[in-house]
Amino acid sequence: MFRGLLFNQRCLVPSSGFYEWTHDEAHIRCHCRQPGEPITWMAGLYDRGEENPRFAILTTAANFSIAPIHDRMPLVIPTKDGLNWLNDSMEAVSLLGREPAALSVRVV
């Protein structure tokens, strides 16, 4: 299902960041975002669908900045790589295999 979308229907989902909760008894909420960037871009795939358009945010294994909180995280695309994600299928595949950059994590 996703293979065809990966090569033809990639998108970037803008956000101010995302939330994860710790998996201990405290369930502490943390806000995660790209440091020094006003927008955190998450890799997505879209499908126009027969009735309604839809999209999915891709996830990947957590990097060292998120791993203490959760074992997965959205695939964050650095701003400088955004056009490559959207326009270059081979570069998009490369970004899928790259370890995500460290994120800023703040307890909220």
Image (spheres, grey):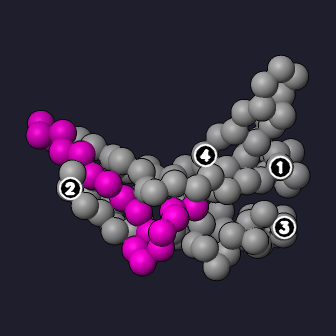
Asked if disc 1 and disc 3 are in contact, CB closer than 8 Å, the reply is no
Which quarter of the picture shows residue 105?
Answer: bottom left
User: Which badge, 1 or 4, comes first in the chain's sequence?
Assistant: 1
The type of residue carrying mark 3 is: Asn
Residue at mark 4: 57
Query: Real-space Cα distance between discs 1 and 2?
Result: 34 Å
Taking the spot 21% from the left edge, 51% from the top edge, the residue there is 108
User: Which badge, 3 or 2, comes first in the chain's sequence?
Assistant: 3
Neighbor class of circle 3 (other Cα within 10 Å; few <14, some 14-19, many 20+) is some
Residue 60 appears in view: no
Query: Real-space Cα distance between discs 2 and 4?
Result: 23 Å
Work out whether 82 lies above or below 47: below
**Count of numbered labels shown in the rendering:** 4
Give percent across and percent down for residue 27: 18, 39
The type of residue carrying mark 4 is: Ile
User: Which badge, 1 or 2, comes first in the chain's sequence?
Assistant: 1
State left or right for residue 49 relative to residue 42.
right
Secondary structure of residue under mark 2: strand
The type of residue carrying mark 2 is: Val
The type of residue carrying mark 1 is: Gln
Taking the spot 52% from the left edge, 70% from the top edge, the residue there is 99
Q: Which label sits on residue 87?
A: 3
Q: Which label sits on residue 21?
A: none
Work out whether 48 lies above or below 88: above
Secondary structure of residue under mark 3: helix
Q: Which label sits on residue 9?
A: 1
User: Which badge, 1 or 3, comes first in the chain's sequence?
Assistant: 1
What kind of secondary structure does the magenta stretch mostly adopt?
Answer: loop
Query: Real-space Cα distance between discs 1 and 3?
Result: 10 Å
* Magenta part of the chain: 24-41
Which quarter of the picture shows residue 2?
Answer: top right
